Image (spheres, rainbow, N blue to C red):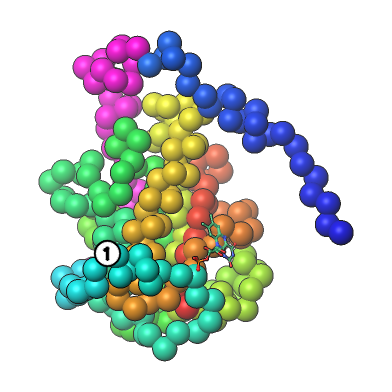
Amino acid sequence: MLIMKMTNYYMSYHESSCIEGRHMKKETWTDSSHWPKEWTELEFKTYPRFPAIELNSNYITSTMSLVEALQGRESLRTSSEEILTFEKLSYILKYSFGLKNITQKNRRYYPSAGARFPLECYILINNCERIEKGIFHYNVLDDTLEILSKGNFREQIEDIFGFEWIRESQAVIFLAAQLGRTIVKYGERGYRFALIEAGHAMQNFCLLSRSVNLSTTTVGGFADHKVSRLLRFSKDKEIPLYSAVIT
Ligand SMILES: Cc1cc2nc3c(=O)[nH]c(=O)nc-3n(C[C@H](O)[C@H](O)[C@H](O)COP(=O)(O)O)c2cc1C
């Protein structure tokens, strides 16, 4: 029988991220007139020296209702007949993780604590119409896919997840967090907020994927450090939180 060695780190983390009533006074988070610029200035990760592919989310308008998408969403771990097209990928990335409007950079399709938006999105493409295999970063400002590495990364995918069905998938999305953006304002609680936000954004992704007939499964079980190495995260700056597989 597998006996899990448990520590109580989660409870000590929970305790250290609790808010005491006295910290909710007007002069802290709730009164924006006193906020330092570190709480209001937004950071966006971009790779200006890397080539990028312009996405186009305008081709698709799904007619599926929200309730139908909710009813239809389920985790599917077998290969799907539904091809991941450039248009579908553009559509689901934009409306899951993108900006609503380039002139208002603190508004996206999911809520974020204090509009700090700590999440970054990466995608490993194995099979997508019009896009070569490789590793990409979703640039929310330009609505582009920045090409980080071209090539076949199926072996690394299997190494990270340990499952054949993920290795054979059409694409894998990773949501990572630049925790500093949130921690600077909320301290330890910022870690909780990043996890919650990843859930919000990923639910968009699941429902949008469903609305264009793509099969997805969200996956929390992966080798964290292998993901960080593959995506070349700076230590202590960015961490992988959550992933989704398009089969
Ligand atoms: C936080 C989280 C982590 C998950 N991790 C995995 C995983 O590592 N592997 C997997 O096959 N499914 C994973 N899933 C999918 C669940 O197994 C699945 O959602 C659950 O069985 C309910 O089925 P449904 O999604 O079809 O409704 C995860 C789901 C969530 C919300």
| Quadrant location, the N terminus | bottom right
Element assignment for label 1: helix
Tell me residue 37's x, y (percent): 28, 24
Magenta run includes residue 211? no
> At x 52% / y 47%, what residue is drawn?
239
Left or right: residue 55 compared with residue 16: left
Highlighted range, magenta: 25-54
Q: Is residue 169 above or below residue 140?
A: below
Left or right: residue 205 compared with residue 64: right
Tell me residue 30's x, y (percent): 29, 20
> At x 15% / y 51%, what residue is drawn?
101
Q: In the displayed image of the protein, which residue is found farthest to the right?
A: 1
Q: Is residue 79 above or below residue 7?
A: below
> At x 68% / y 34%, what residue is drawn?
9
Label 1, on which residue?
A: 66
Left or right: residue 11 compared with residue 128: right
Q: Is residue 105 above or below residue 210?
A: above
Magenta run includes residue 38? yes
> At x 31% / y 11%, what residue is drawn?
27
Tell me residue 26's x, y (percent): 30, 13
